[in-house]
Each structure stands twice: as structure tokens, then as C-alpha cells.
């Protein structure tokens, strides 16, 4: 999977389906519920039940192999982490899930690839920078997708896309706790238009 990932940090089960529908309608191919949100596994389950056929649902801020299993049981198909933990990556791959480990250095990127990751979360993206991503692109295997997360918004998404990013994670610029589905949908459509422009 490549493209935009909606990061719903702080979302609650009561609102997650409405927000998820707005994101799916806007063309988002993936939605992540960070595990430091209220009742995250319930939100993952609700999203997977409602939209799993059209959208890749995942858990974020996954730090342990136990949480990989819990996320899988809830219906998650991707595992997003802020760090590079080979055990978490291997556990996700073993469960048939897509890992998105966080990497901030070339050493972490190669360690994540060696553990089985095929998509890398550049985090924080502002620290790696577009120039850094281009340099990594030159030495990593061609099939590895690089997705900036942290500091990506409407002012620079097009630049990341033009530089060869396989996707991007969008957090507080897309959703903040308390935001309604309508507002999230408007922002989601704007980001989709930026991402898909020629």
C-alpha cells in the first residue's frame, strides 16, 4: 500500500466510524489509530469492520509484539511504529500485516529492511528532510517505500510527493481530538487533491 495515511491520534470509538467514512469518501487508502488514543483496539475493530474491504486499517505507536497480536485480533492490517524494533517488524510480517517502522537514520532504515519491512516511516520527517530522503533513495533497494511523517502538511506535501515519497502520514493537520467528520472530510479532500495532482 502506498499513499496517504490518516493518523487519528486521540479519536474515540464513538466518533471513529463517522470520521473513517469521511476519510474513505475522500479517497484515503489507509487509516491509523495510535495506541495512545482512548480504547484504540475498539476503534481499530470498528474501522476494520466498516471499511476494511476498501481501506487498510492499522494501529500506530505500536511498541511491543503483544500489541501487534492485539491489533491483528482487532482486524488491523498494518502496524505503524515510531521506532525501528526488529521484533515488532518480524511479528507484523509473521501475522501477514504490513509494518511501517519509524526510521531517522540510514542505519535504522537498513535494519528495518533486514527485519522484513518494505515501507519505512521517515520520522520525524522534518529532521530527515527531502534531501535526506533523496539520498536514502539512492542507496536503499528500489522497492522500498519511503513515507514522511511528522511535519508534513498542506504547505509541503506536494514537495514530498515530487521528491518520490511513496506516501505520507498526516496527523494533527488532518485530525485533532474533537474535530467533526465534516471538517476532517474537507481537509482530507484537500490533501487528496494535492497528493494526486500532476
Image (cartoon, rainbow, N blue to C red):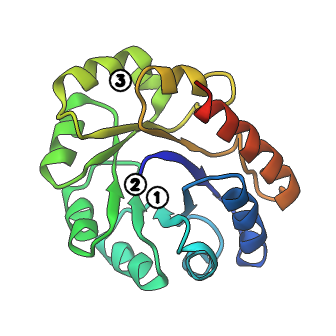
Q: Is residue 186 above or below residue 105?
A: below
Give coordinates of residue 163: x percent, y percent.
43, 20
- Kindly identify which residue carries mark 2: 81
Mark 2 or mark 3, earlier in chain? 2
How far separated are the C-alphas under marks 1 and 2? 5 Å
Instruction: Name the element at disc 1.
Output: loop
Instruction: Please tell me which residue lies in front, 197 or 144.
Output: 197
Q: How crowded is mark 1: few (under 14 residues within 10 Å), some or many (20 or more)?
A: many
- Kindly identify which residue carries mark 1: 61
- Kindly identify which residue carries mark 3: 133
Instruction: Name the element at disc 2.
Output: loop
Circles 1, 2 touching at the beta carbon (< 8 Å): yes
Mark 1 or mark 3, earlier in chain? 1
Which residue is painted at 50% across and 27% down in the image?
161
Would you identify the image quadrant in which residue 86 lies? bottom left
Q: How crowded is mark 2: few (under 14 residues within 10 Å), some or many (20 or more)?
A: many
Which residue is painted at 35% across and 23% down in the image?
133
Q: Is residue 180 visible to the viewer in this orientation of the structure?
A: no
Q: In this view, does 9 lie above or below 47?
A: above
Amino acid at each position: 500500500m502506498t499513499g496517504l495515511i490518516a493518523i487519528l491520534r486521540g479519536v474515540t470509538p464513538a466518533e471513529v466510524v463517522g470520521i473513517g467514512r469521511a476519510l474513505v469518501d475522500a479517497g484515503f487508502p489507509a487509516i491509523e489509530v495510535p495506541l495512545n488514543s482512548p480504547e484504540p483496539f475498539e476503534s481499530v475493530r470498528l474501522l476494520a469492520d466498516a471499511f476494511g474491504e476498501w481501506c487498510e486499517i492499522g494501529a500506530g505507536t505500536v511498541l511491543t509484539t503483544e500489541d501487534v497480536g492485539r491489533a491483528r485480533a482487532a482486524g488491523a492490517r498494518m502496524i505503524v511504529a515510531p521506532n525501528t524494533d526488529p521484533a515488532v517488524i518480524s511479528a507484523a510480517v509473521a501475522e501477514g500485516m504490513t509494518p511501517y517502522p519509524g526510521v531517522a537514520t540510514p542505519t535504522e532504515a537498513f535494519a528495518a529492511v533486514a527485519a522484513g519491512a518494505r515501507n519505512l516511516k521517515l520520522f520525524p520527517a522534518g529532521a530527515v528532510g527531502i534531501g535526506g530522503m533523496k539520498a536514502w533513495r539512492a542507496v536503499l533497494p528500489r522497492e522500498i517505500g519511503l513515507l514522511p511523517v511528522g511535519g508534513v502538511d498542506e504547505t509541503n506535501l506536494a514537495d514530498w510527493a515530487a521528491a518520490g515519497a511513496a506516501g505520507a502520514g498526516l496527523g494533527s493537520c488532518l485530525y485533532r481530538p474533537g474535530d467533526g467528520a465534516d471538517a476532517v472530510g474537507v481537509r482530507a479532500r484537500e490533501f487528496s487533491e494535492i497528493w494526486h495532482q500532476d
